[in-house]
Every structure is written in structure tokens, then in C-alpha cells.
Amino acid sequence: MKQPKRYLITSALPYANGPKHIGHLAGAYLPADIYVRYLRAKKEDVVYVCGSDEHGAAITIQAMKENTTPREIVDKYHTMLKSNMADLGISFDIYHRTSSPLHHETAQEFFTALNNKGDLQQKETEQYYDEEAKTFLADRYIIGTCPVCANENAYGDQCEKCGTSLSPDQLINPRSTLSGNAPAKKLTTHWFLPLDKHEAFLREWILTEHKDDWKVNVLGQCKSWMDLGLQPRAVTRDLDWGVPLPADVKGGEGKVLYVWFDAPIGYISATKQWALDNNKDWKPYWEDKDTKLVHFIGKDNIVFHAIIFPVMLKLHGNILPDNVPSNEFMNLEGDKMSTSRGWSIEMDDYINDFVKKENGGDQMVDALRYYLTQIAPETKDSEFTWKGFQDAVNSELVAIFGNFVNRAFVLMHKLCKGKVPPLHADILDEADKKMFEEIQNTKTKIEDLIEGYKFRDALYEVIDLARKGNKYMQDKEPWIVAKTLETDPGNQKLIDNCLHICLQLTANLAVFINPFLPFAAKKMCYLLKVVDKMLDWENAGKAKLVSVGYSLRAPELLFRKIEDEEVKGQVEKLKIKSEKIKMENKQPETEIVKSEIANLKSEIQFDDFAKIDLKVGTILTAEKVEKADKLLQLSVDLGFETRTIVSGIALHFNAEDIIGKQVVVVANLAPRKMRGIESQGMILMAEDKSGKLHFVNPDTLIDTGSGVS
């Protein structure tokens, strides 16, 4: 593979609508920072950009909650997010914001370029409108039932339960979050990006060109999304907060760019601002094919960064991302992390509790970075527990890594007069030689793993090298050998060799750990009395990083232990915060609290239920829908006629196994097209706690077409 001339690294722009939790940190920011620090150590030309996403419905919704303006919201949380990231060692070259004039200008130019070339479609469509609120509804102002997993509170742009990207028209029984009413449809004119015209390119680029180097979860979600059928996606919306359409666009008055369109352009505007600040040229980073562009994201952003933004970049003449390493979600103490439910550890809270409250707070930054990397959700969801955090810090950082470094310094001061002892090549044994080999092998392993975005495994190799160092020292027992010096002074050479190798290993550990735990690496340089330049990757694996005869500083602990009381206090704090929010959101008892416990929908009248016509049907045929992993096309006999019904049950049942099954069908549901097939009804299914679907059918065979009441 050709070596890039330069790297442009991005992390997903966080919404400036509130504090972000450590799950966000683990998903898109810490992995990118590790990768960038490694590239900088290799002296690569690399720029790492990010910034606050300050437009969209999430901002206006938060402004309403806090009874303030969108501008005050973004100013407040942009400052918090920028500070939090810096405090936790995330080393952006620039942390920009999409409310800046430069971003507005860049996004408008991008829109104009596509629009002038005819790459956008302008058409009049019916959009959801809240008659009571007198406003068109942005996607986040609409909730309804997800057509894929039946989650009843899916947003108009995405279902946060199954992760499927949606449009408001796909929601079943949509309702406005402003009034709670079912919205009406009203004509409005918008511009659309015709994704359907680019499906062939996307399939070739993603599923063929990147089938071997992109993560399986990214490839799978892209394929699934394309299999459901790409549709034109609106790039404008009726809203008063966002990037306004250029003034010369006819019919663009009162419209802004959709946040999904303007936000990723924020990477470009951030690069422009970085270039202005540093007297650089931004264009090669977005236009030169010798640039390697990598987007670090969470799985809820896969579609936007792997499908939609690449189409935009291709049309605009920019380079395409080389990789989109996406992480899954990180849960917390047995439940999904959620700021809105109070079940989260906010970055700001961790900083206040562990970093700013004590001297040496930097080591607590590294402690968090260590544990989050160790449990990173690289291929599947993972879980943060305070007990797990304590065990990782105490039994690995302290007892293995920190212990080895500390013992090497203590013994060097005690047995070698505080100076780096010489290496006596004439008496090197196999164990000594093996340690030098292990150092060199570890370098190669770490390089391969980091460049393959396997940061968990790379970190393991660093800790494992320290573990091998501990065993080497324990086997050599220089403190025991020291007791023989009176009778055999020549044994000092054995002590010298052991501690010389341990100190060279310590210096290498500083180089290896630097991308992961930068504060610990710098402290190790301080103890070794070397400049931070030693951390350059060209020094990794070298056998002579510290000079013989050089006096080193007295040992200092790199990490402190996490006490039981701290863990207990944090778990209790989490429970109290969650319970407080539950009480604040609790319905009055007159509104029937039991409905919340049983997951009941809001109460309906008998007349509402009487509108639904339920019939018993028999499945005659079943087959997979082409290019749709989740869909089966069924022929269902209702007694009076045979219906075609498309159902999202293919992941739960084999087509041949359900022929002859009797099912309950909503027979008077309005037809809707799915993958070009008109579905004439809906089969009722039950979902157990594990997410497995089950048929709702009669206990015994009854006449097809029988009513259900």
C-alpha cells in the first residue's frame, strides 16, 4: 500500500446541547487521539480536526428545555466540551464550531457548487407540520414506531434502539414532540441529495474496494442500509436555526441546511481555520489523493460518514475517506449509558471528581484512558463498571506497569549508586538476549495493531511487555545477588546487566505507552532525565535509549491505587443521580404509574381499538426480499383473499419453516411500499427480553379469515 504524504483525522462533531459522557469519549475521541499521537511520534504530517456541532433540532430542543436561546446553548456547551476534551488529553489540532462565519461560508459554498452542477434535486413535497405549534417539524421533533424493530419512540432521523437511520415518512404513527398531536402534511419546497443515483458507486467502493480493510460492523450496517433501498435525502429544512441557504438561491428564504449536510462540512471548515491560524494551505488535505482521510465515529454515525458524506465529497471533487473505524456502544453498570436518564458518567463529573480535586490529577486522566482503551467497544458493545475500573488500575497499571518501573528505579539507586549501569556483553545470557528481542518484537506488534485500528490489542502488548519485564527481574533476583558481593565482587556485573536491561526497557515502555497514556510517558521522561523527544517512534525498540553512567532521579509512583471507598461512592452517586431524574420525570399518580412499569402505551378508547380489523391468516409462501437481509415477502391467505405482506422477520425465522403457520394480521392497515413491493397488511409479533420475535397465533388451527377480538 502506498505511503500517504499526509493524514487528516476527524472525530465526530459532538452536539453542543449538553455535557458528553465517557461512552462518547471511548467511541470517537480517545481512539482517534491514540492514532494521532502515534502518527505524530512517527513524525508524519497529520492534522486532527474536530469541533462542536451547533445546529439542528437537538440544539433548539435543549434551548426550550433551559428556557433560553440556541446561541446561549451552543456558547455554553461548546466551552464545556472544548475544556473537557483538553483536560482528558484529547490533542486536537483545532476544535472548531459550526456556528462560525467561516463554517457558514464553507457550507454555503459547498451547497452552491452541488446545486449549480445539478447534483441536487429541488422538489415540492409534503412535510410534517404541527398545526397547533404552527411550524414544520424537523426530524427530531417527530417520534413514532420504528418500522424495523417496533420501538415506539424512534426519532424521525434514527431509531436509537436498533440504530437504523430513518426518515419521518418511515415512522409508523408519527407524532409531534411539541404538542403530542399527530402531525399533518403540508406542501413545502426543498433540495434533495439523490442517494439512489449513487448506489452502484457506493456498493463498489464500500463492499468491494474496502471489504478487507473496513470493520465488519461498518460494512454490515452499510450493506443493510443499501439493501433497504437508498432514497433521495433532503438537504434543507424549514427552521430558523442553522446555516441559511445562500441569498441568491431562489425559494430559499426561511430555509437552512439540514444539520446532517452541514455538520460534516465542519471538518473542512475546521481544516480551513487551522490552516489560517498556522499559515498553511488547507486544500491538499481535502483534494490531494496522497492524503489519508480517516473518520473516527460511533456506530450511530456510520451511515452519515460511510454513505452520505462520501457521496457529497465525490460530487464536490474531494478525496474519500480511507477508513471509517467505528466503535459500538459502551454500557454502564449493566445498563445503557444515557445522560437523559442520569445513567452516565459525564466527562465533566470525572474531571471534577478525580482530576481537579487532587495533585497529580494527570495520572487519573491516564487511568481513565487506560480502562476505556482496555474495554473499548471495538467490535461489540462493552461495559464500564467502577469495580472493573478499580481492578484495571490496581492490578495492571499499578501492580504491573507502575510496579516494574518503580522497582527498576529503586534497585538502580540501591545497587548501582543511582546511575545507569554498564552492559557487560561478555556475560549476556539467553534471558538477557530474550528481553532485547521482546522489546523489538513489541514495537512491530504495536505498529501493526495501531495501524489496523486495534487499540485494545496494542495496549495489551505494552502491558504484556511490562509483565515480561517483571518476570525477568524476578527471575534474575538482583537483590539476592547483591548479598554475594562481599565474597564474589564479580557478581556486580550480573546486577549491572539486569538493571541496565530493565532501564532500557523502561525507556522503551515510555515510547510505547505514549500514544495511550501521554502524561505517564512524560513523567517517565522526567524520571529518566531525558527530553520528551525520546518519545519519537524512531526510538522505539532501541537497546540504548539511556546513557551508561547517567544519574537518574529518585523513584516516584506513576499511578495511585483506587480505594474501595471511591468505588462505593461513585456507584452510590450514580444511583442517586438516576433516581433523582426518575423522580423529576415521574408522572403524577393520577396518570397511572403502572403504565410506565409495564411499558404500556397511552390509554385509548374502545372506538379507537374498534377501528383495527384483526384477522387470522395462513402463510402460503415465504421468500427473502432481494438485497434486504431483514425482510421476508409473504403470501398470506385471509380466507376471502390472498395478501402480499412484507415483514421484517428474516433475522428470526427461516422462510421455509414458517409456511403453513397461522398468524394474526392487521388487515385494514393502509398499504405501503417496502423495497418496491406493496405490503398489504402487518403481522403481529411478540418480542421477548432478548429481542427475539415470536408469532402471535391461535392455540389451535381455526378457519382462515376468522376475526380476532
Image (cartoon, rainbow, N blue to C red):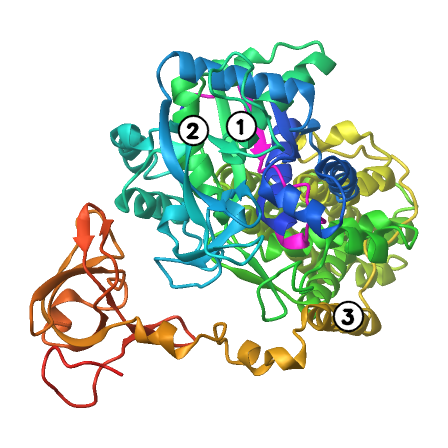
Residue positioned 64% across, 47% down in the render = 61
**Residue at mark 3 to residue at mark 2: CA–CA distance:** 53 Å
Q: Residue 565's x, y, as percent?
A: 83, 73
Q: Residue 233's x, y, as percent?
A: 39, 34
Task: Indicate which disc residue 567 carries.
Answer: 3
**Residue at mark 1 to residue at mark 3: CA–CA distance:** 50 Å
Q: Nearer the viewer, residue 7 or 61?
A: 61
Task: Indicate which disc residue 294 carries.
Answer: none
Please tell me in which quadrant of the rendered image residue 549 appears: top right
| Residue annotated with mark 2 | 190
Residue 115, relative to residue 85: is it above or below? Answer: above
Please tell me in which quadrant of the rendered image residue 523 appears: top right
Range of residues picked out in magenta: 2-23
Residue 677 shown left or right of residue 312 in the figure: left
**Residue 94 visible somewhere in the drawing:** yes
Look at the image and tell me in which quarter the C terminus lies: bottom left
**As shown in the figure, which amino acid type bears the numbered disc 3?**
Val
**Residue 408 visible somewhere in the drawing:** no
**Residue at mark 1 to residue at mark 2: CA–CA distance:** 8 Å
C-beta proximity under 8 Å, tags 1 and 2: yes
Residue 487 lies in the magenta-colored region: no
| Residue annotated with mark 1 | 255
**Mark earlier in primary sequence (1, 2):** 2
Residue positioned 57% across, 44% down in the render = 442
Residue 667 shown left or right of residue 178 in the figure: left
Q: Residue 403's x, y, as percent?
A: 77, 58
- Few, some or many C-alpha atoms within 10 Å of disc 2 (few <14, some 14-19, many ≥20)? many
Judging from the image, what secondary structure is the residue with disc 1 in?
A: strand
Residue 679 shown left or right of residue 388 in the figure: left
Q: Residue 1's x, y, as percent?
A: 40, 25
Residue 638 shown left or right of residue 588 in the figure: left
